[in-house]
Amino acid sequence: MKRKRVKELLAGTANGEKVLVKGWVRTKREIKNVAFVALNDGSTINNIQIVIDLNAFPAELLKDITTGASIGVTGTLELSQGKGQSVEIQASDLTLYGKCDPDSYPLQKKGHSMEFLREIAHLRFRTNTFGAVMRIRHAMAFAIHKYYNDRGFFYLHTPIITGSDAEGAGEMFHVTTFDLNDPPRTKEGAIDYEADFFGKPTNLTVSGQLEGELGALALGEIYTFGPTFRAENSNTPRHLAEFWMIEPEMAFWDLNDNMDLAEDFLKYLIKYALDNCREDLEFLNKMIDTGLIERLEFVVANDFVRLTYTEAIKILEAAGRKWEYAVGWGRDLQAEHERYLVETHFKRPVILTDYPKSIKAFYMKQNDDGLTVRAMDVLFPGIGEIIGGSQREEDLARLTGRIVELNLPVKDLWWYLDTRRFGTAPHSGFGLGFERLILFMTGMSNIRDVIPFPRTPRNAEF
Ligand code: 4AD
Ligand code: MG
C-alpha cells in the first residue's frame, strides 16, 4: 500500500478507508485498553491520532512505541470520537522502524528553550516550532523563484568562491589549500598565492551582486539566490556568518523602480505565506508571537514610507531620546535608530534613501551633491534593515574615482569596470537577507532559529 501523508489524511473524510501512514510518535497515552498515539510525519504541524487496541498487539511491541519512535501504521480512517481532531486511524497493523530510548531522548513533552534546542539542532526539526519555521522557509524559497520567474527575471548562479570583496568591507573568509603552518613563500617572504589552488587569493563570496550586474547588463533582469558569507564578528540576534541572500539586478531601472520592486516583492512574499502557510502561522501566532499575523496583514495593506537619510536624521535628532549610539549626519544608523523610525515614529515599513557616500559601498551611484549616493535600505518592524540596495554607478570615471579614493584594488575589478566601458547603462538592484525575511515571517526572535544549521562566531556544529 502507498503511504499517505498526515496532511492529506487530515484533509480527507472518515470513510473507513484503509490507509498506511508513517511518522514519529509525538505522544502516547493509555486509557484502559486503548492507547492514543499522536503521530507526526512533518507534512503539517498537526498530528494524526492513532487508536491502538492494547489487546490486539504484543506488549513487547507496544512498550517500544514511545515519544520519538518511528512507526508505520495501517488502519482505517474513522470519525474521531474525541475532541480536537476530526479523523483518526484505528490501527490494524503496526511496524516499529526505530526505537527511541525515553531516558536519553532530549525532546520530551515539556517545552524547551530556544537556546537548548540550538544545542540539539540535529533534532529540533521534530518540534512544532521548527517544523513550522522550516515549512515556511521552504514556502518562501519557492515563492521567491515564482515571483521572479513570473516577471521574466532570470535566475543567475553567481560564484561562491571569488577573488573579489563585493562590499569592500574586508569581512571575508579566505579559501586556500595551503598548509597554514607552512605556506609557500616568495623570495621576499610574503605568502606566495601564485602557488595556491587558484593562483591568487580567494574568498567565500559576501554577495553575488557584482557578477549579478554583469548578467543584468546582458539579460536585462536577473536575480541570484544563494549562500553568502561574512566574517563580521557580530554576535547579534540578526547576524549570521553564513546566510542566504536574494539579489535582483535590473538594467535600465532607476532607484524609484528599485524601491517599487522591493515593496511589491516583500508584500507578495508575505501574502504568499498568509495564503499558503496558514496553519503554521497560526501556530506561531499562538505560541511565539501573538502580534504576528496582524503585523503581516498590516504590512501587506499599507504603503511603505519613503524618505531620505537626511530627513531621517532630523527625525532622530528631534526624538528627544537617549541613544546608545550617537545620531548625527554622516553616522551610520544602528538597529535602535532604524527600529525607532519604523516602530515608534512611522509605525510602518520605511525605505530610506540617499545615504552619505562615506558609509555605503563603492558601487553606488553618486548624487550631484557630491556627498550622498542613490542607496536604499528597507527597514522593517522588529528587524531593522531587511533589504539593502542602490542604483549603481554606471559612469566609468566616477566609479573608478571612487574605487581609487577608497583604496580598493582597481586592477582586480577590470571585468566589473569593463561593463561601464562597453555599453554601460543605468541599473539598480538590492539584496534581501533571506533569514531576516524568515524572522519577520515567523515572529521568531533569533536569526539562529530560522536557518537549519546556523554559523556564527565560534559556532559551526552540525
Ligand atoms: O546591505 P547588504 O550588505 O547589501 C549587499 O550585500 C548588496 N550587495 C545587496 C545588493 O545591492 N545586491 O546586505 C543585504 C541584506 C541586508 O539588508 C540584510 O537583510 C542581509 O543582507 N544581511 C545579513 N543577514 C544575516 N546575517 C548577516 N551577517 C547579514 N548581513 C547582511
Ligand atoms: Mg546594508
Image (cartoon, helix red, strand yellow):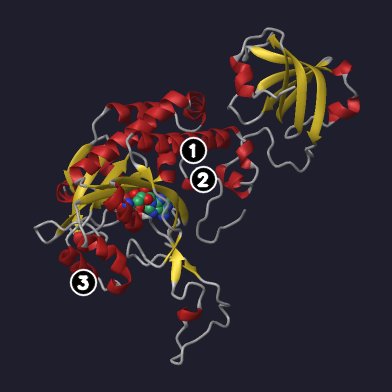
Q: Please state which amino acid type lies under the numbered disc 2.
A: Ile
The quarter of the picture where residue 50 lies is top right
> Which residue is found at the position 32% from the left and 65% from the top?
168
For the residue labelled by badge 1, is the local secondary structure a helix, a strand or a loop?
A: helix
Tell me the residue that label 2 is attached to.
Answer: 451
The quarter of the picture where residue 70 lies is top right
- Mark 2–mark 1 Cα distance, whole angstroms, equals 8 Å
Tell me the residue that label 1 is attached to.
Answer: 137
Asked if marks 2 and 1 touch (Cβ < 8 Å), the reply is yes
Tell me residue 298's x, y (percent). 32, 28
Tell me the residue that label 3 is attached to.
Answer: 405
In the drawing, does residue 432 fall left or right of residue 458?
Answer: left
- Is residue 319 at least partly visible in the picture? no
Between disc 2 and disc 1, whose residue precedes? Answer: 1
In the drawing, does residue 179 fall left or right of residue 295?
Answer: right
For the residue labelled by badge 2, is the local secondary structure a helix, a strand or a loop?
A: loop
Between disc 2 and disc 3, whose residue precedes? Answer: 3
The quarter of the picture where residue 78 lies is top right
> Which residue is found at the position 76% from the left and 34% from the top?
69
In the drawing, does residue 71 fall left or right of residue 57?
Answer: left
Asked if marks 2 and 3 touch (Cβ < 8 Å), the reply is no
Q: Is residue 456 above or below residue 96?
A: below
Between disc 3 and disc 1, whose residue precedes? Answer: 1
